[in-house]
């Protein structure tokens, strides 16, 4: 039987929980400052001669995560993981993907040891050919159609089924060409990939810099496809505000210049404010032309320090 005393006690507990709710929600939101990552493509000029020393410098700046982009320093998985651990780093994502073949699962086992949770598997068709003059990393291919992009999505889903056995998802990374309309229609490769890939198996790694150069409204993308953008490449560029709707993707590439984060025109303060809607889990700073600034590590430091000021 509920007495007056027990009723008041229960009511008081309910009020206390209600008052604490906003604080609990705030506490559950990730502190992005504690997991800023660096795409190692940014410092690729230094890695061949001193991979470990470069990681030491990256960690010294304050980075907590890295994304391998070229090699694993010719180390076995346990050795590579030990090197990451030495500097307090983790590598939840990779662009040095696995390759189709009889030892695919063994490769993924190695990725598991390294702590990787999102990967690519080479052997599937590329989502789109890289345009002449930049925007990609040597990816090429024939002109694509809606059906060919659907086949890419289906293959990525199949790879995702394999990766799931190792606690991983496939990732799809964009440049600018994924936003170029396919021949014979208004659909773009990115539209097809979003529609045809299984969110349980495939995460979109949104390169915000290239998407912005391609004329995309990042916040609208989050609103239209909430939860799909678990991974981000945080990249900045100048020249975006001067672009017109009539410009081709090749024109946009020529009119833009990549710069350290915070020195360009991408509104990262607003974008990170919508991270929950996007479904963000991990992100990494990337500046493809950092070495052209004279010191790629120094450029990575500027990006890190500027992003710290923008993050809540």
Image (cartoon, rainbow, N blue to C red):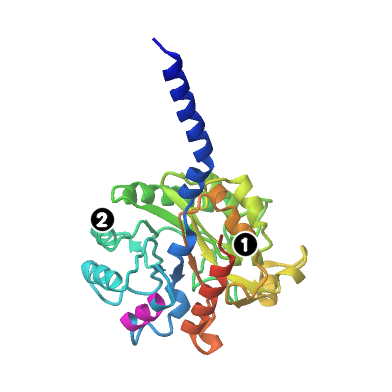
On screen, residue 107 versus residue 295, left or right, reads left
Say whether residue 14 is visible: yes
Residue 192: x, y in percent?
57, 49
Q: Secondary structure at mark 1?
A: helix
- Seen from this angle, which residue lies furthest front? 5
The residue pinned by badge 1 equals: 269
Q: In front: 157, or 205?
A: 205
Residue at image position (58%, 75%) is 134
Magenta stretch containing residue 54, yes or no?
yes
Q: Residues within 10 Å of mark 2 (few under 14, many from 20)?
A: some
Query: Quadrant of the rendered structure where residue 50 is?
Result: bottom left
Q: Which residue is mark 2?
A: 105
Q: Quadrant of the N terminus?
A: top left
Where is residue 167? Give x, y as percent. Answer: 31, 50
Instruction: Say which residue appears at 59% left-offset and 60% top-offset.
Output: 178
Q: Distance of mark 1 from mark 2, alpha carbons?
A: 40 Å
């Amino acid at each position: 039987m509920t007495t007056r005393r027990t009723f008041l006690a229960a009511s008081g507990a309910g009020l206390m929980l209600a008052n604490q709710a906003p604080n609990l929600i705030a506490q559950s939101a990730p502190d992005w400052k504690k997991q800023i990552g660096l795409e190692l493509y940014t410092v690729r000029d230094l890695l061949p001669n001193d991979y470990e020393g470069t990681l030491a410098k990256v960690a010294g700046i304050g980075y907590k995560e890295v994304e391998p982009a070229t090699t694993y320093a010719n180390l076995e998985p346990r050795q590579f993981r030990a090197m990451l651990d030495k500097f307090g780093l983790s590598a939840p994502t990779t662009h040095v993907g696995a390759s189709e073949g009889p030892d695919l699962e063994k490769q993924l086992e190695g990725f598991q040891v390294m702590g990787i949770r999102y990967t690519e598997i080479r052997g599937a068709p590329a989502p789109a050919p890289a345009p002449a003059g930049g925007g990609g990393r040597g990816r090429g291919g024939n002109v694509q159609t809606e059906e060919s992009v659907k086949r890419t999505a289906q293959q990525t889903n199949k790879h995702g089924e394999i990766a799931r056995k190792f606690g991983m998802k496939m990732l799809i990374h964009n440049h600018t060409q994924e936003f170029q309309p396919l021949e014979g229609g208004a659909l773009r490769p990115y539209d097809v990939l979003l529609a045809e890939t299984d969110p349980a198996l495939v995460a979109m790694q949104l390169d915000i810099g290239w998407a912005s150069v391609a004329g995309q409204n990042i916040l609208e993308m989050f609103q239209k496809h909430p939860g799909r953008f678990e991974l981000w490449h945080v990249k900045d560029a100048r020249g975006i505000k001067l672009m017109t709707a009539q410009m081709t993707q090749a024109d946009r590439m020529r009119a833009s210049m990549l710069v350290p984060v915070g020195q360009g025109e991408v509104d990262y303060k607003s974008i990170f404010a919508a991270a929950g809607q996007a479904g963000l889990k991990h992100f990494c700073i990337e500046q493809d032309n950092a070495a052209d600034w004279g010191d790629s590590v120094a450029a990575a430091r500027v990006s890190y320090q500027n992003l710290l000021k923008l993050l809540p």
